[in-house]
Structure formats: C-alpha cells, structure tokens
Amino acid sequence: MIPVSIQIRQALDRLWLPAMLLLSIAIMLLGWANQRVTVAARMATADVLSPLWSLVALPSHEISEAVSELHSIGHLAHENAQLRSENENLRGWYDVAVSLTQENATLKDNLHWMPDPLPSFVTGRVVGDVGGLYSHAVLINAGPANGVRVGDVALAADGFAGRVTETGEHSARILLINDVASRIPVLLESSHGTAIMAGDNSSTPRLIFYAQDNHPVEGERVVTSGQADLLPTGIPVGTVHYIHAGTPVMVPYARLNHLSILRVFNFETGTIESPDAPGRVPVTSSRSFRSDGKKDNLLDGMTLGGVVESATGHSPAGYQPQRQDTQGSEKPDSFRTNEEHPQNQNEDDNTQGDHQPLQKSGSIMPHSSFSFPPAGCG
Amino acid sequence: MSSDPHSHPQSHWHPDVRSAPALAQRLDRLAMRLLPGGLTALAAVLLAAPTGIPGAIALIPGLAMASVFFWSVWRPASMSVPVVFCLGLLLDLIGFAPLGVTAFAFLLLHGTAVHMRFGLMRLNFVTLWLAFTLLESCVCWLSWFLVSSLSFRIMPTAPVMFECMLTAGVYPPFAALGNWAHRRFSNPEPQL
C-alpha cells in the first residue's frame, strides 16, 4: 500500500463515486452502441452461473416433485377414477387419430405431398429464470455445442414457449412468448384469421392486428402461422380468451411460469431457396441445406404421425431406416417431379394423370406406409 | 515472510512479528468489507435459479436495494462504491436490463444514502423506512426511465409500481437481519 496522507486518501475516496458513475454511463452507452458485446458478456455470465443454477434447481425440483407426489397420494382414488374415464375417452380419440392419420397419409400420397423437413431437436433443462422487471426469459443448459442456434423454437411439453435469442457456450437464452418484445404471427384455427400475438409481460399475450371483419372466437385454438419464414405452421400455442369485449388474449398451453424442461427445435425454415431468376443478383443463403443432421432425429414430435407413433410404442429404431431411405433417395426425386409437375398439370389429361402417380408411388410409398398396430394394443 | 527484503536493515523491531497479524487483520477486514456485498450477490444469483418460489426474480432488485441502502447508511465501509458498482453490474448481467442501468441507479442510491447518512441514522425506524421507500421509488423510476429511453419504447409501468411496493416490503425483515449482523460482526471502518 502506498503511504499517502489522510487528506489525499479522503480526496481519492471521494473520487470513487463520480468515477464509477461515469464508468456505468460509459458501459450503458457501450452496451447500447454495441449489442454484441452486451450479449457476449451476458452469455459468459450465464455460462459461468448455469452449472450453479442447475445445482440449486435440482433439489428444489426434487422437493416440488415429492410434494406433488404426497399431494397426489391423498387424491389417489379420485384420480384413478378420473384417469380411467379419461382413458376411455382417449381410447376413442386414439381410434379417430389412427384412422385420420391413415386417411391423411393416403391423401398426401395421392396429392404427391412434399414432406415437411424433419425438425431436429435437443432437450434442455431450464436452469435460470433470467428475465427481470421488463422481460420474461429463461436459460437452458444446452447451447451451440448441442445444436441450439439463435432463432430456434422452444416448445414446452404442451405448447410453444418461446424462441432462442442468445446463445453462450453451453447455455441458451429463450425469450418467452409473453415477453413485451415478443411478436409471433399466429393463425386462428376455426375463424381462419391471422393475428399477431404480442407479449405484454402478463401471463396472457394479447392478440393484435386481426381482421376487423373476422374477430377471434372465444376458445378457438391458436397455432403459429408460417409467415415471415420464422416459424413453421401449426405449432399449438394456446386458446383465445376475451378478458373484456374487444380485447382478445391468448391463454398459452405452456405453463410459462413453471417451465422445467424445454425442447428446442430447429425447423430449418430458412433453407427454402427461391429459384434463380434471370437478371437478378443471386442471393447466397447463409445456411446451407442440411441433410445429414436430420437423419439422427428419432421423433417427429410435431406431426400426428409422430405423436401416435410414440404413443403406440412403435419402436422408432425400426421405423427410422425407412425414414432415412426416404430422406436419402426420395428427396431428389420429389424435387424433380415438382419441377416437372406444373407442365404436366397444364397439359393435363387423364392418362398422364394415371401414369404419374404410379411411377411416383414407389418413391413416395415408404413415407406414407405408416404401419400402425391395431388400436387395442396400445 | 520472515526474510522480508523491504524491511529496513537498521530496523530494530522484527517485521515478522508485526506483519503476520497485520496480514491476518487486513484479510479479516477485507472479508468484513466484502461480506454484505458478497452475500447480496449470492442471494441474487440463488434467487435467479428456478427454485419455483413465486416472484423470486422480482425480489432480486428489491433485496439488493435494501442491502445497498442499509449498509450505506450504517456501514459505508462494508458497502463501498466498487462493491455497489459490481453488484449493479451483476444484476444487469443476470437480468435482461441494458448493461449499466442498475449499476448507475444503485450508485446514485448509495451516494445519496452516504451523503445523508448522519441525518438518516438519527431517524427512528418508521421514518427511515419511509425515507428508504421514497429513495427506492426514485431509483425504480429512474431505471424505468433509463430502460425506456435506451430501448426507445415506453416500458409498462405496472411492474415498476409492483417493484416499488415489493422493495418497501422487503426492507423491514432485511433491516432486522442487518441490525443483528451489524451488532454481531465488528465494524471494518478504517481507523484513521
């Protein structure tokens, strides 16, 4: 320690506060001017703290599980009866789902439906509630090392939860749909309208920008719309509810206050490239088409086929090679046929219409040949 | 330590006898100095974990403000300017607010509390609580203003009011705990 007189030391002590105030203003301006530095600093902190947070979260998770278990023991008989009746109900729905899936598969087969790319996903535990006064966000313990990228879609067990906005080394921050900065284009299922779901920091995001002659209907399902190429179409989000006349909000399926495990999907929505037009400067896509990454995806959780398949316990391992073959061999075929198809349709006559499906059914067939076990065995 | 090269060769008192307790004392004083800030930072980090406690995340700024104010009034040496700055920056990094906003607001709170220290110490508890409520409301609104102006958007005001009330509610239990610690642990004020 440098020996200085008491007066000088006191004067230096008095300088601390203005110096630090200036420093904080400088940090504010720096963070405002260069967002990347802010994000990097935040995610570095999150990377350091996320192991600690997951350590803290583990016992509390176990405690809450034990408490809910104790709670359920008290209502065992009642719950059993409820489950039994629900099971009866669901068995009926299962039959409906299987027949609908088969019908859907047949229809898609007949229509030469271009299969949606299989989403790859990773599952992470929520290790931090990193929102604040003005924001709602969570931190998961999976990062770019696990394939999480900015813009990916995070789904809770029962619905859309948010999108990845920042990634660190082994952690990613997910902006929830009820954050004030969140704007998601949605589709209203029964009124067939579109709207924007805008978060307002409450538990129910508002629905704005819907058509004035087609108001959202109370209780209808809300799914994501594929507009703006950010999200795939049809991810379940919630249901419409009117808190007052004229102010529709959306009650999310996901319990945004109690997120514990999130699945982060990469839907590759940006991979669809527009064909080159003469006279236009070709735009190079930032993301290349991934074909190998999607093959190790075991579960197609988004389609009814995937859901039913996992419900029936139909082993994905046995099912997967079919998918892989389809992915590998059929893709170029269907691309080609898609290019040929418009001409065929224009000069369309019945004989060609007959020939075309026959020739292609061989290639499309593996995709639609879902072999479901009979309804009873699930 | 026994062969201290800086000790004066003509010195007839032994530096090793003096320096060892001085070092321990210094470390002890440093620990005392960092204890309130460190505990507050730890509490903030732990509350940010998904413990399932409702409103835990909203409690963080309130708790930190109560801590900064309490220690700034009663023991400024334990809550020095760099500690306040680091605490604010940590809260900014954990939360989603623009970087530096909380640090700036906390420094102003600390500066005001230290400046009015001897006046505040004379007040009884209820008046002190009211003074704190006034100050923390100012801090909450200041950070609301800063966040709003930095993001070019008027932020919702309901959370600010909630935060003001929560912080005011946090103060009495915190002050009770702090009073106990204040009596229990010795003061690291530098003896000038």
Image (cartoon, coloured by chain):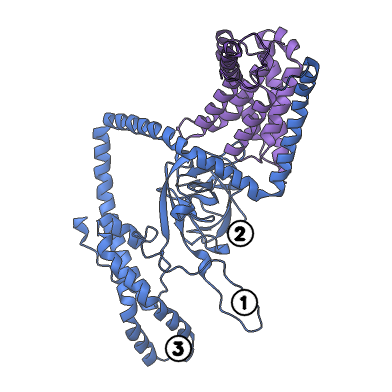
Chain colours: A blue, B purple
Q: Where is residue B90 in the image (x, y as percent from the top left)?
A: 60, 34
- In terms of image quadrants, where is residue A66? top left
Q: Distance between the residues labelled 1 and 3?
A: 28 Å
Rendered residue at 74%/23% (across/down) = B111
Q: Is residue B116 left or right of residue A272?
A: right
Residue B93, percent across and down?
A: 60, 38
**Of residues A78 and A117, the one drawn nearer to the viewer in this rendering:** A117
From the viewer's side, name the closer residue of A21 and A375. Answer: A21
Q: Is residue B166 visible in the rendered structure shown here?
A: no
Q: In this view, does B65 lie above or below A288?
A: above
Q: Residues within 10 Å of mark 1 (few under 14, many from 20)?
A: few
Give the CA distance from mark 2 to mark 1.
36 Å
Q: Which amino acid does label 1 sit on?
A: Pro
Q: Distance between the residues labelled 2 and 3?
A: 38 Å
N-terminal-most mark, 1 or 3: 1
Label 2–label 3 contact, CB within 8 A? no
In the rendering, which numbered label is found on residue A282? 1
Circle 2 is placed at which residue position?
A211
Asked which secondary structure carries label 1, the reply is loop
